[in-house]
Image (spheres, rainbow, N blue to C red):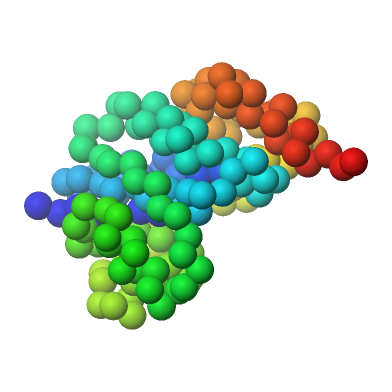
């Protein structure tokens, strides 16, 4: 049995993430999805809570024909210990998927197999660009799965982001 690990902040979860996870599902028997920086929320770069991100991912992947586990992972601010921290929080896994150079380096240093999947339409499907559209009141919905649109509307996510980005 192969179990893959994929980590991201998912602020918000978008079609780029969806594309990578659907490709991972073609080869892995199970997938562990790590929600990085799980302790952060209500910030311009991290507007959604870990629980809200779990909801986005779980609903967007309801069609997936593989078991998957969504695990919030808090930052520990010690890169040399981070992989051990991740491994203590997640079920065992034998392959890591990430395009983040630091994540790739840290897992490679401990001898884990790491793959860097090609990003799907990276220019338009990135959390920064989507949050910017939300902040400016521009259409963002086409960049995330419909289930994510529903979650963001349910929690008042756009309004939250716009409010916390305001100045006093």
132 or 19: nearer the viewer? 132
Q: Is residue 149 visible?
A: no
Q: Relative to residue 81, is residue 45 drawn left or right? A: right
Q: Is residue 2 visible?
A: yes
Q: Quadrant of the C terminus?
A: top right
162 or 21: nearer the viewer? 162
Residue 48, above or below 2: above
Residue at the (51%, 49%) spot, across then down = 39
120 or 93: nearer the viewer? 93
Relative image position of residue 92 (x, y in whole percent): 19, 57
Residue 125, above or below 94: above
Residue 90, above or below 163: below
Residue at the (45%, 35%) spot, across then down = 51
Relative image position of residue 24 (x, y in whole percent): 29, 49
138 or 76: nearer the viewer? 76
Q: Relative to residue 30, is residue 22 drawn left or right? A: right
Q: Quadrant of residue 144?
A: top right
Relative image position of residue 140 (x, y in whole percent): 66, 31
């Amino acid at each position: 049995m192969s179990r893959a690990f994929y980590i991201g902040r998912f602020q918000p979860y978008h079609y780029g993430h969806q594309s990578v996870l659907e490709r991972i599902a073609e080869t892995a028997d199970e997938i562990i999805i790590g929600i990085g920086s799980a302790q952060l929320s209500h910030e311009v770069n991290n507007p959604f809570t870990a629980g809200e991100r779990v909801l986005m991912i779980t609903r967007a992947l309801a069609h997936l024909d593989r078991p998957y586990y969504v695990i919030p992972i808090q930052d520990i601010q010690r890169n040399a210990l981070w992989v051990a921290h991740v491994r203590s929080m997640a079920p065992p896994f034998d392959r890591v998927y990430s395009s983040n150079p630091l994540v790739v380096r840290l897992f490679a240093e401990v001898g884990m197999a790491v793959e860097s999947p090609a990003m799907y339409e990276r220019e338009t499907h990135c959390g920064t660009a989507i949050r910017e559209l939300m902040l400016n009141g521009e259409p963002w919905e086409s960049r995330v799965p419909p289930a994510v649109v529903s979650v963001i509307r349910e929690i008042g996510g756009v309004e939250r982001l716009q409010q916390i980005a305001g100045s006093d």
